[in-house]
Every structure is written in structure tokens, then in C-alpha cells.
Amino acid sequence: MRTYFNNIYMALSTILIGMKVTFKHLFEPAVTIQYPDVKPQLPTRERNRLYVNMDDCIGCDQCARACPVNCIKIETVKSLPGEDLGQTSNGKRKALWVTTFDIDIAKCCFCELCVFPCPTDCIYMTDVYEFSEFERNNLVYDFVTLTYSERKEKKDNYEKMMAEKAAQKEAEAKAKEQSIKDKPEEKK
Amino acid sequence: MIYEYFSNLTGSEVLASIISAFLPLFLFILPFALIAVLLERKVSAHMQDRLGPMRVGYHGILQTIADILKLIQKEDIIADQNDKPLFNIAPVLVFAGSYAVFAAIPFSSSYLGSNIDLGLFFIVGISGLVVAGILMAGWASNNKYTLLGAMRSAAQLISYEIPTIMIVVTVLMVTGTLNLKEITELQSGYFWNWLIFGGNIAGIAKYLLIPFMFVGFVIIYISTLAEVNRTPFDIPEAESELVSGYHTEYSGMKFAMFFLAEYANMFAVSAIVVLLFFGGYHSPFGYLGNTLGLSWLVPIEQLFWFTFKGIGFVLVQMWLRWTLPRLRVDQLMAVCWKYLIPIAFVNLLIVGLITLL
């Protein structure tokens, strides 16, 4: 009999306590963030999508070598002796044309290892994390600022220069040979 | 009441009965369901420190309208092994059962579907039809979860009807009438004339009645909560156990009918509690229409008070839903048979003795 009334008392009183709790929560501000409109605040050292500031890139290839998953692909060509490529923001002279700078962000593991070796701080993590695509190929980002014709031009220039140099060398070599051939005759 | 008014207005009995039959549906139940569904989602969200629907309209006001548009467009799926006639009748029956209750509920002194002398009895009887509909739905779906849900629902509804009727009889002994309009009129005046405060009786009996009326109110509230399958008594549609109970197999508008019936039932049950214990459509403190001398204002105020009280109890139902966990089947039966029925019975005896005084 005593447990019977005790049960009733316990049931009613605990229900009232529970109702008090839920009533308090009714007026508490919601923890929900209205996501696409309001973005959550990211931690200070968050690692998201990579970005390369090509104005500062000297094409040193250190980031590509640091990458554990080989998602960065860099190709460079030497500039012509007369060309001035300008300087990076921290005063390094640029000497190479970067004709390819592809980051396959689908492969990227967001380890940030490529960021530290960069001598000019031109590759860094941004706070962009919404970059889903329907095609996997669209996730290969091309950071080179040159147009395709310009890239071809630079490559051609370089090849031409090299060819010229080779031709010059050959000519010099030939001339040397000639002179070696000629000399003994003179001595005679 | 409303029927006579329309038959005078249109001069045709058929038209009048059609209008008076559809009026509460379009004027009250559909808007109420729209508001209550949104209210439930918002209240539950805020109780859990969430925001709830926010996208459709300002703070998601139009969410239920969007949901209804979606439900109308949905395919009506009927599985091969369903018992088709029963499967199709069941939602209609469930909705008819809960809708018929509104015929006898006086929304205000001048709006009452049918002023029948056995109003309270009619409500208790007609809501029993819902059990048949639920059993039909569960059996005809040919699915183990629906059948389990329907069985549980039938067991629950039938057992919880006993304490409900006990309290109805208790009130009946005090008022001496089953006519809901007369019961309401007995509670006219100020709020201390409501039956929960002992009714409009002079003398010591009024004060003696108050605690027992309060116990009666608590019991009828708990048992009607169980009758409309709301948490903590929602084992017939326990989401985590039975998918969604007896209406698992329904889709589109048939599901919407079950849903509408559920919300109509919620209000009907609150309305019964309001009618029996909280003065029905009467204002707790006089009418603005009477003081201003505008007699047409009084019924509108009464409608306002009735819906206000009804929605208040619906809100308490929601509040309880987001507070309490679900009972086990044996606990459910224990609450009914070991606690509610004996207490209701003792309460009945004591109230009987007091009214004899």
C-alpha cells in the first residue's frame, strides 16, 4: 500500500520535474546555425582548400616534393636571358616560367605539408570548404595565370633558345675543330 | 443550431445539412491541423534547443502548406498483398470517427453542430469507431509492424476508455446531464463556477468537490492522452520499434487523412477536458460584449475562449510529448489497470457521496 502511493507520488513529481526542465529549454536560444546563410566560425588553424598565389611563385617545386600523395604537378621552363619576370613580394627574383601548376584537390589529404617549405609563402590554405563537383576532373585546379598560347610561346622560346645555344655550341665546336685542323698546316 | 440557421438561410434541408457538416472541417479542423503541425514542430524544436522549420516563409510559417502540397502530389501506393477494400476504407473510417466527435462539441453558445441530449455519450461512443479503423488499417496492410501497432492500439484504446468513462460518469453525477451545452451552461459566470473548482453549487459541497474534481481532471487527461496515442503512450506508433505503427503502409492523401485524424483527435480530446472541467466556451472573467452592450460579440468571444483553452491543452500534450519517454506495454497496462481505474473508481464513489449531501 505504501509503495503504491509512493509510486503515484514519484510518477507525478518526476513528471513535473521533467516538464520544468523542458519548459526552461523552450526559452533557451537555439544552438542551430542556419548553415548556408550563417557559416560556423572555423578554428584558427583550419585546413581547407589550397590556393596558390602565382604572382609570388618561383617554380621551385618544393611543395610538389613535400606532397605525400603527389597531388601537385609543376612544370617550369627557363626564361630568356633578356626577360624580366619581376620579383616576389618578399624580394626573390623570379627566373622560371611556370607552365603547369595543377593541384588535384580530390587527391589532396589536407596535410598542409606543402605550405611550410614554400620560400615565398605563395601556397596556403584558405577557408573555402564548399567545392563539391559533379565531375572528378573539375577538381583538378589549374593555377597558372598564363594563357595556353603564352605557355606554348614560353616553351617554344626556351626550345628555340636551347636550339640556338646548341647550334652556337656546334658552330663553336666546328670552328674549334676547324682551327685544330688548320693549325698544324700553319705550323708546317 | 447551425443547421437550423442554414436551413432558414438557404431554404433547403439538404444544402443546409451539407454546409453544416463541412463547416467545422474547413473552418476549424484543417486550419487547426495546419497550425498544430507547425506548432508541434516549432515547440519540439525549441524544447530541444533547435530552430525547427525555418526555410518556407518567415520562420517556416508556410512549412505545413508546402508539406500538404507534397502529400497531394504523392503516389498512392497500394501493395499487391493488401486487402484492398479494407485498406481503402480504414483511413476514411478513422477520420470519420474523429471528425464525428466535432458534431456534438459546442464551440460557442451559437455554434453547435447538433444539440443532442446524449452529447457526451455520443462522443465516447463515436470515438470507439476509431479503434475499428485502426485495426482495419493494421490488418489490411498485411505487414507485421502495422499489425503489431494495430493490436497494441486496440488494447490501449479499449483499456483507457474505462478510466475516461469513469470520470465522465463522475462529472455526470455532479451535473446531472449528458448534454454538453447544458454542462457548459452550468459552468457559466466566472471561473470559480468551472467544474474543476466544484461547479456552480452553493455551500460546503463545492469546496469538498475541488480536490476530487482535480484528481478526476488529471485522470481524464492522462487517459485521453493514451486514447489519442500521444507520447508517453504512443506505443501503437512507436517509431523506434514499429516504423510508424498501423499507418506504415499508407502514403499520400491516405496518410494525410490519418495525420489529420490524429490532430483532430488531439483537439477533440482537449475540447472534452475543457468542456467537462474548464467551463467549455465560457470566459473566465465576463465578456467584453456584455460590458459594451454588443450582444453579437459574445459568441465570437466564446469561440475565442474555447479554442484558446483547447489549444492550451494541446500545447500541454506537446509539452508532455517532448518531456517523457515512451512506456513499455506492461507499464502502460499497469498505469491503466492498477492506478487509473481504482483511483477513478474511488473518486467516483466519493463524488457520489458528496453530491448526495
Image: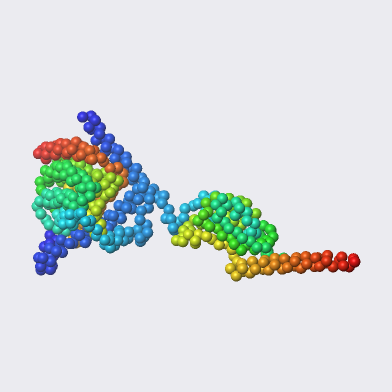
Q: Nearer the viewer, residue B76 or B355?
A: B76
Residue in view at x 52 percent, y 56 percent:
A105
Residue in view at x 12 percent, y 49 percent:
B125
Residue A76 image point, x, y percent: 63, 61
**Quarter the C terminus of chain B occupies:** top left
Residue B260 image point, x, y percent: 23, 56
Q: Nearer the viewer, residue B102 or A154?
A: A154
**Quadrant of residue B336 within the rendered picture:** top left
**Quadrant of residue B351 within the rendered picture:** top left
Residue in view at x 26 percent, y 47 percent:
B242
**Quarter the N terminus of chain B occupies:** bottom left
Q: How is the image coloured?
A: rainbow
Residue B254 image point, x, y percent: 22, 57
Q: Is residue A31 left or right of residue B128?
A: right
Residue B73 vertical placement versus B315 (above, below): below
Residue B104 image point, x, y percent: 14, 54
Residue A23 vertical placement versus B353 (above, below): below
